[in-house]
Amino acid sequence: MPTKILMVCLGNICRSPLAEGILKSKLPTDTFEVDSAGTGGWHAGEHPDKRSILTAKNHRIDISNQRARQFKLADFQNFDYIFAMDNSNYKDIIRLAPDEASKSKVRLILNELYPGENIPVPDPYYGEQNGFEQVFNLLDEACDIIANKLKTHHI
Ligand code: 4NP
């Protein structure tokens, strides 16, 4: 059974598609699966935002085939680790959690990089291209740490 990781933001078109692509690029595909979802469903079925696709491409990661979907209850069973991009995503997921085991799977992603600081990945949707580059760099650093922990079973 592969270890399964889910990245979650609001729309699943800007931040979590980048997080999915970045973490995938750092893990062996035979033993790990990475997916992403949005707490909101407005963009379900859409490809990632063009600016996320371009930012990933500039770092030699292809996320253009991803499709947005809404976070669902079954995700608590289907995934081992659930990483929220910001505090409102975190609260929304925790609110849906049916039990303590589900709650314990949920983490704020930048707490891997800045433990205990509860720093959000800023939502770049209403900003410019350089906001997406900043998001990429934050997620790249966090995913380095996450990938190393996952590979050594110390998460
Ligand atoms: P994301 O960004 O949560 O990083 O995918 C957003 C995308 C769309 C919206 C909000 C945030 N929206 O309101 O449509």
Image (cartoon, rainbow, N blue to C red):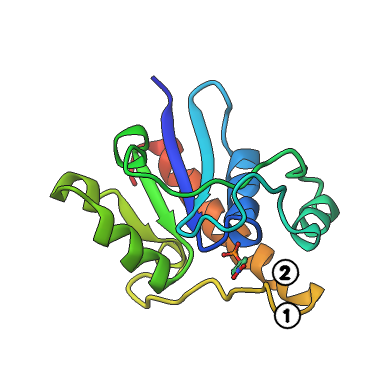
Q: Residue at x 40, y 37 (%)?
A: 152
Q: Position of residue 4 (x, y in %)?
A: 43, 34
Say left or right for 91 vs 12: left
Classify mark 1: helix, strand or loop.
loop
* Residue visible at 38% across and 45% down in the picture: 72
Q: Using a 10 Å C-alpha cutoff, classify the residue at mark 1 as few (fewer than 14 neighbours), some (14 to 19) or many (20 or more).
A: few
| The quadrant where residue 67 appears | top right
Q: Considering only vertical position in the picture, is 2 above or below 96? A: above
- 2 and 1 marks in contact (CB < 8 Å): yes
Q: Quadrant of the N terminus?
A: top left
Query: How far across and down, in percent of the image, does residue 44 sit?
Result: 59, 49
- Of marks 2 and 1, the one in the foreground: 1
Residue 50 position within the rendered picture, expressed as x and y whole percent measured from the top left: 81, 58
141 and 8: which is toward the camera: 8
Tell me which numbered mark, 2 or 1, is placed earlier along the sequence. 1
- Mark 2: which amino acid? Phe
SS class, disc 2: helix
Q: Which label is found at residue 132?
A: 2
Instruction: Tell me how far mark 2 sits from mark 1, CA to CA.
Output: 8 Å
Ligand 1 - quadrant of the structure image: bottom right
Residue at 44% over, 41% down: 5
Mark 1 residue type: Gly
Mark 2 neighbour density, 10 Å: few (under 14) some (14–19) many (20 or more)? many
Q: Which residue is mark 1?
A: 127
Give the left or right position of residue 119, taking residue 43 as reference: left
What is the x, y in percent for residue 23? 58, 45
Determine the image quadrant of residue 28: top right
